[in-house]
Amino acid sequence: MPVLTRLIPSPVVVDISSGALDDLAGLLADQRISASGKLALAVSDGSGRALREKLAPVLPGADWYSVADGTIDAAVRLADGIKGKRYDAVVGLGGGKIIDVAKYAAARVGLPMVAVATNLSHDGICSPVSTLDNDNGRGSYGVPTPIAIVVDLDVIREAPPRFIRSGVGDAISNISAIADWELSHKVNGEAVDGLAAAMARTAGEAVLRHPGGVGDDEFLMVLAEGLVLSGIAISISGDTRPSSGACHEICHAFDLLFPQRAGSHGEQVGLGAAFAMHLRGAAEEAGLFADVLRRHGLPVLPGELGFGVDEFVRAVQYAPQTRPGRFTILEHLNLSADQIKDAYADYAKAIGS
C-alpha cells in the first residue's frame, strides 16, 4: 500500500534567537540561499538605517533599497529597482510593512525572499500573503512563503512595546478564526483543513495561556514561534482561513470606514476576537480573551481605541462586506444595528467594563 502524504510549504530555515542577525551572512551562505552575498536588502528610512550600518560591513555584496511605505506602489518600485540585477534573493529587513513590500517585490521578479523581522506585530513574517495599501484602501496579495525567517530577540526587545502587543492580538485571534471556520463547516459544509487548524489553534493557545509579558524573553520566543506557525498554517490551507474570521472582518471594517483613526492591526483583531467569542455565547472564553488582552495592554472596548459605541456598531455591521463569501459568526447571526448594540452592551457588562 502506498504511503500518501503532502508537502508543506514552509521556510527552509527559521532562526529565532538572541543575536540572530550577527551571522545573517553565514546563515544565508550555509543554507545555499546566497553563497555569493549578492542580495537586495529592503529597509525603512527610519529604524532600518541603524541596522544597515550594522550589517553593511558583513554583507559587502548587498545593495540596499529604502522603502518609503507599505503601498502597492512602493512594492512595484522595489521590484522595478531589483529587476535584472541577478540577485540571489530579496531580504526584507524591518517590520510588517517592509516585509510585505519585499515579499510582493520578490514574487514579482521571481526571487526567493528572506524575512528578517525587527518586530512581532503580526503573522505576516511567514505568511504567503502581502497586505498592501492601494487606491481602494488595502488589499491582500498572494505570494510565495519566505524561504527563511530570522528573528533576533535582541532587536525585538528594542522595538516599541506596542508592536509586540499587536502581535499578541493577532496570534490569539487565531482561536476565534478557527471557531468561525468550524461553524462554516457545521452550517455550510465548508471543508476544514485539520492540520492547518491544529497548527493555528496551537499557536494562539500558546500565546493566550503563557503567563509572561512583552518584556519576557521566553514569552517573546513563544510569540515569535506562534506567528511563524500561523503563517505556515495559512500556506497549508491555501487561504487565510486559519487566522482570519469575524475578528479580521471587524478589523478591516475599521480600516475602511475610519482610515485616519484606525488602530494597529493586532489591537483591532484582538478586540474583534473577544467580541466574536461573546457573540458565540462562549462567555468564559470571551472573558479569558479580555483578561489576557488587558494584561498585555491591549484594548477590549472600542472607547480604548478612540471609537464610540455607535461607530463600533457600524463597523461590526459593515464587517461582512470586507470578505465577501467568507462565513463567520457575523454572517451566521446577521444582526441588525440595534441587535449589535444590545450584544455590545451585554459584552461590555460581561467583561467588566
Image (tube, rainbow, N blue to C red):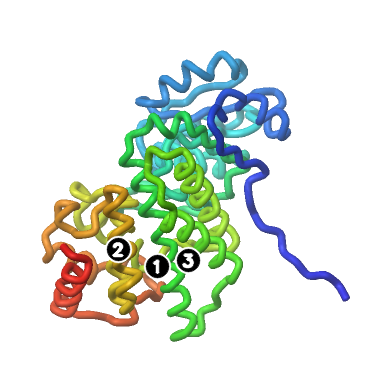
Image quarter for residue 339? bottom left
Q: Is mark 2 on a helix, strand or loop?
A: helix
Q: Is residue 31 above or below residue 107?
A: above
Which of the pair 348/149 is nearer the observer?
Answer: 348
Give the mark nearer the N terminus: 3 vs 2: 3
Q: Which amino acid does label 2 sit on?
A: Gly
Residue under label 2, please give it: 272
Q: Which amino acid does label 1 sit on?
A: Ser
> For residue 241, which numbered disc appears in the image?
3
Horizontal placement of 215 versus 339: left or right? right
Front: mark 3 or 1? 1
Q: Is residue 228 above or below residue 40?
A: below
Horizontal placement of 176 versus 88: left or right? left
Q: What residue type is labelled 3?
A: Arg
Which of the pair 79/186 is nearer the observer?
Answer: 186
Q: What element carries label 3?
A: helix
Residue under label 1, please give it: 176
Q: Do labels 3 and 1 touch, CB within 8 Å?
A: no
User: How far is mark 3 from mark 2, CA to CA?
Assistant: 15 Å
Instruction: Name, please, the residue furthest toward the right.
Output: 1
Q: Is mark 1 on a helix, strand or loop?
A: helix
